[in-house]
């Protein structure tokens, strides 16, 4: 996916002032319009500049910082800045937030020295001695460190000189004195304190260890130390360290660097410069044990242009006047359509666009300014762009964050009734786009005019895919009666019907091997009707060949089961299953579809490798063709002829077709590769038929004896390669590659008639071959046929 960013990387400003966003006004922006800039200070100064919480103008909060303390009450900080904005209001709200952390963690208490005791008297009464002092250590608790340093200090002291030996006098009195004293009673039992937190694992893989400690509270003689151990050790991160081939290497994609990661892990990155938010990517492991990067997820990335559009929507809502708000929604619709038409959006932009459409619908409901016909057309054109089959991968990505496609269905239903309420009695509206056919009509409750048939294929402006489809809806007029008996003359029904060409591809899928194998048909009526005996008849055509066990289903928003998802099989009965379509009879008005089991040749494993029968058939066919080409090359000088040249070209076209079939199976998820594969398959399959026709032509010329080698070879080449190239070129030019490759297979689409670009020429060639074969056979078998043996041999 390539994105051509229109907006530069946001400069570090809090808010920009502007009368209106320039990309919305276009040529209406005056040249002398000025933009004022407010430069911010550091984000570390809280309260200086503010950013409104939840405001799309503000960037997302950064990750919380590491806690300032590992135990006790610490703090964490996160910051954000304000996206540069061309709107005329300052941002509000904090740019810096702080919260406490680790409140429940208990810190270890280290040992602490008490005060020193007074210095003692000198150790001698005369001469040089020493004085000492001591201090006590309060014991450490809960794994804290013991006291460091000495318990005893000494310093020298000097007393008066001692008298000589002959001048000593005998000391009188006792040498020592003693007295009784008592201390508090020693505890007779001790108990363990609480465990502290486990330490970090010593290894990230290949089995490390973690430790935690606890302290024994109490220091009495009895029961100390406590029974048991004050330390526990356990293993952690026992998974094997990934080998070199099990690590995804550093990769630089879309202006983002994805760091080396082990298989199975997810890493996060900032979105590309033209968007805000975070992108993610998983490192996967193939069935052969080799790591490879998955597709990046942009479900949380919002382009700046879509954020600015949402800001302009809020500005229109802030105008206060309902008429001005309604006119503003018209402007938002035009701008959203312009953005969608570029097709340069992220999966997060699709989710954001659903919210924009929701706000537009809700605003029109409250406004006195009803949506015009242009507003309605633009709304459904935006929806058509959003549900296009090209966005299937983006919707699958967005599904990780929110079921946006389900929310989109609800928005479409609400907008239909908004449009219907503005219609006059018995008035109807028909909107046709590339992926939608919408019918909206208003009928008085007391006088429903007729049965409802949809779609009306004879209407002007109907697209080919809808005109040629077999999808039908029949609602008897008796079904349209109120559930409650209270109905006045002013009551009316708003009846909406939508045929979605591709919605089944983007809705949350049922469990494999089931899949949505038809278009999706939505019917909505308000106020609700009561269940009636005449049932609703629905007929839906198949969009995938070879499916089995089809069943009619309705969408139920309240269901979340893992099997069928939100599809309910109890409201409808499958009446008849034909090769091209399935007939259903339903008891309620809802959203209808057909689920079926996919054919085995379409059931691919997660690595995208083809099925075993396909591989075996492909290998046998390719080996036979290669062997034939080698034989022709070895004996070419002996068998060189027009017929040999034709057969060689025929073998080459068949071999190329086999290779493309395999490529198409292994690259099904790539839209561009699938389209090219389908186009070349179209060419080589037609070429195979054309070379068969060339051989028939050569046999006919040999029979009538008018073969001229040089001239014929040029004509043979033009027929064998030129005619298929012309057919494919015309088909690609008219369809602009739409229909080359589908979500299920890399071949021509069954819808829109493109398949006839292959079936038609192939059928004509088969018919001509039969006629030429009959003519040549009659000529060879007739009495006045060819007598020259060499001509007979050349004719076959």
Image (cartoon, rainbow, N blue to C red):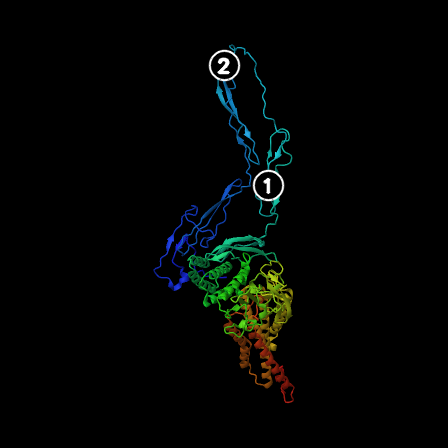
Which image quarter: residue 601? bottom right
Q: Position of residue 641 (x, y in %)?
A: 59, 79
Given residues 386 and 453, the one toward you in this image is 453
- In the picture of the structure, the residue carrying the numbered disc 1 is 211
Given residues 135 and 188, the one toward you in this image is 188
Verify CB contact (< 8 Å) between mark 2 and mark 1: no
Which image quarter: residue 399? bottom right
Q: Position of residue 604 (x, y in %)?
A: 61, 63
- Give the vertical position of 196 relative to 696 (above or below): above
Which image quarter: residue 473? bottom right
Q: CA distance from mark 2 to mark 1?
A: 62 Å
Residue 252 in view: yes
The residue most toward the bottom is: 784
Q: Residues within 10 Å of mark 1 (few under 14, many from 20)?
A: some
Given residues 434 and 498, the one toward you in this image is 498
Residue 659 in view: no
Q: Position of residue 592 (x, y in %)?
A: 59, 66
- Give the vertical position of 75 relative to 777 (above or below): above
Q: Residues within 10 Å of mark 2 (few under 14, many from 20)?
A: few
Q: Position of residue 655 (x, y in %)?
A: 59, 71
Q: Mark 2 or mark 1: which comes first in sequence?
A: 2
- In the picture of the structure, the residue carrying the numbered disc 2 is 162
Dot 1: element: strand
Q: Classify residue 28 as left or right of residue 487.
A: left
Q: Nearer the viewer, mark 2 or mark 1?
A: 1
Given residues 548 and 560, the one toward you in this image is 560
Dot 2: element: loop
Residue in the image at 37% along x and 56% along y:
35
């Amino acid at each position: 996916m390539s994105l051509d960013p229109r907006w530069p990387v946001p400069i570090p400003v809090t808010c920009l002032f502007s009368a209106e966003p320039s990309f919305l006004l276009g040529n209406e922006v005056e040249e002398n319009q000025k933009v004022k800039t407010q430069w911010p200070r550091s984000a570390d100064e809280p309260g200086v500049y503010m950013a409104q919480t939840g405001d799309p103008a503000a960037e997302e909060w950064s990750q919380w910082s590491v806690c300032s303390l590992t135990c006790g009450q610490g703090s964490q900080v996160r910051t954000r800045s304000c996206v540069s904005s061309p709107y005329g209001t300052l941002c509000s709200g904090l740019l810096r937030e702080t919260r406490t952390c680790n409140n429940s963690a208990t810190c270890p208490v280290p040992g602490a020295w008490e005060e020193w005791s007074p210095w003692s008297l000198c150790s001698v009464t005369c001469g040089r001695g020493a004085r000492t002092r001591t201090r006590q250590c309060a014991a450490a608790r809960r794994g804290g460190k013991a006291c460091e340093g000495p318990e005893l200090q000494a310093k020298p002291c000097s007393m008066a000189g001692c008298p000589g030996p002959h001048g000593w006098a005998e000391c009188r009195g006792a040498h020592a004195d003693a007295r009784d004293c008592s201390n508090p009673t020693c505890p007779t039992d001790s108990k363990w304190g609480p465990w502290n937190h486990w330490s970090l694992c010593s290894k990230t893989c290949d089995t490390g260890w973690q430790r935690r400690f606890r302290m024994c509270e109490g220091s009495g003689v009895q029961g100390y130390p406590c029974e048991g151990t004050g330390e526990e050790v356990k293993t952690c991160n026992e998974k094997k360290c990934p080998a070199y081939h099990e690590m995804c290497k550093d990769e630089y994609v879309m202006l983002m660097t994805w760091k080396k990661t082990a298989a199975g892990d997810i890493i996060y990155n900032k979105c590309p410069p033209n968007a805000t938010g975070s992108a993610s990517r998983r490192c996967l492991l193939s069935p052969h044990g080799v790591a490879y990067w998955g597709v990046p997820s942009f479900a949380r990335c919002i382009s700046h242009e879509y954020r600015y559009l949402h800001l302009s929507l809020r500005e229109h809502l802030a105008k206060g006047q309902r008429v001005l708000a309604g006119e503003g929604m018209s402007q938002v619709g035009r701008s959203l359509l312009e953005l969608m038409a570029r097709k340069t959006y992220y999966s997060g932009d699709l989710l954001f666009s659903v919210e924009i459409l929701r706000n537009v619908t809700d605003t029109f409901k409250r406004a006195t300014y009803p949506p015009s016909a242009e507003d309605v057309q633009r709304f459904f054109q935006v929806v058509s762009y959003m549900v296009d089959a090209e966005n299937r991968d983006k919707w699958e990505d967005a599904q990780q964050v929110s079921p946006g496609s389900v929310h989109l269905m609800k928005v479409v239903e609400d907008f239909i009734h908004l449009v219907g309420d503005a219609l006059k009695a018995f008035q109807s509206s028909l909107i046709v786009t590339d992926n939608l056919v919408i019918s909206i009509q208003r009928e008085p409750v007391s006088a429903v005019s007729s049965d409802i048939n949809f779609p009306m294929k004879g209407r002007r402006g109907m697209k080919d895919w809808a005109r040629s489809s077999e999808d039908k809806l029949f609602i008897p007029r008796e079904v349209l009666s109120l559930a409650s008996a209270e109905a006045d003359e002013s009551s009316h029904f708003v009846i909406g019907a939508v045929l979605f060409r591709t919605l089944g591809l983007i809705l949350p899928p049922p469990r494999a091997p089931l899949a949505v194998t038809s278009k999706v048909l939505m019917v909505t009526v308000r106020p609700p009707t009561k269940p009636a005996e005449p049932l609703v008849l629905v007929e839906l055509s198949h969009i995938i060949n070879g499916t089995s066990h089809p069943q009619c289903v309705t969408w139920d928003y309240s269901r979340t089961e893992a099997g069928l998802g939100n599809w309910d099989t109890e409201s409808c009965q499958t009446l008849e299953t034909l090769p091209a379509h399935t007939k259903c009879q339903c008891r309620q008005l809802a959203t209808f579809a057909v689920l079926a089991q996919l054919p085995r040749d379409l059931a691919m494993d997660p690595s995208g490798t083809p099925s075993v029968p396909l591989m075996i058939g492909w290998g046998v066919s390719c080996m036979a063709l290669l062997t034939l080409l080698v034989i022709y090359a070895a004996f070419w000088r002996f068998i060189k002829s027009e017929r040999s040249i034709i057969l060689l070209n025929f073998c080459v076209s068949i071999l190329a077709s086999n290779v493309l079939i395999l490529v198409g199976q292994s690259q099904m998820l790539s839209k561009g590769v699938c389209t090219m594969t389908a186009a070349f398959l179209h060419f080589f399959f037609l070429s195979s038929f054309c070379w068969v026709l060339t051989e028939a032509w050569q046999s006919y010329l040999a029979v009538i004896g008018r073969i001229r080698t040089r001239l014929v070879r040029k004509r043979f080449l033009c027929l064998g390669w030129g005619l298929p190239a012309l057919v494919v070129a015309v088909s690609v030019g008219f369809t602009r590659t739409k229909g080359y490759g589908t979500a299920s297979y890399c071949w021509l689409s069954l819808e829109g008639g493109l398949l006839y670009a292959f079936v038609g020429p192939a059928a004509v060639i088969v018919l001509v071959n039969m006629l030429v074969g009959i003519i040549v056979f009659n000529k060879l078998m007739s009495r006045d046929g060819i007598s020259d043996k060499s001509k007979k041999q050349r004719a076959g």
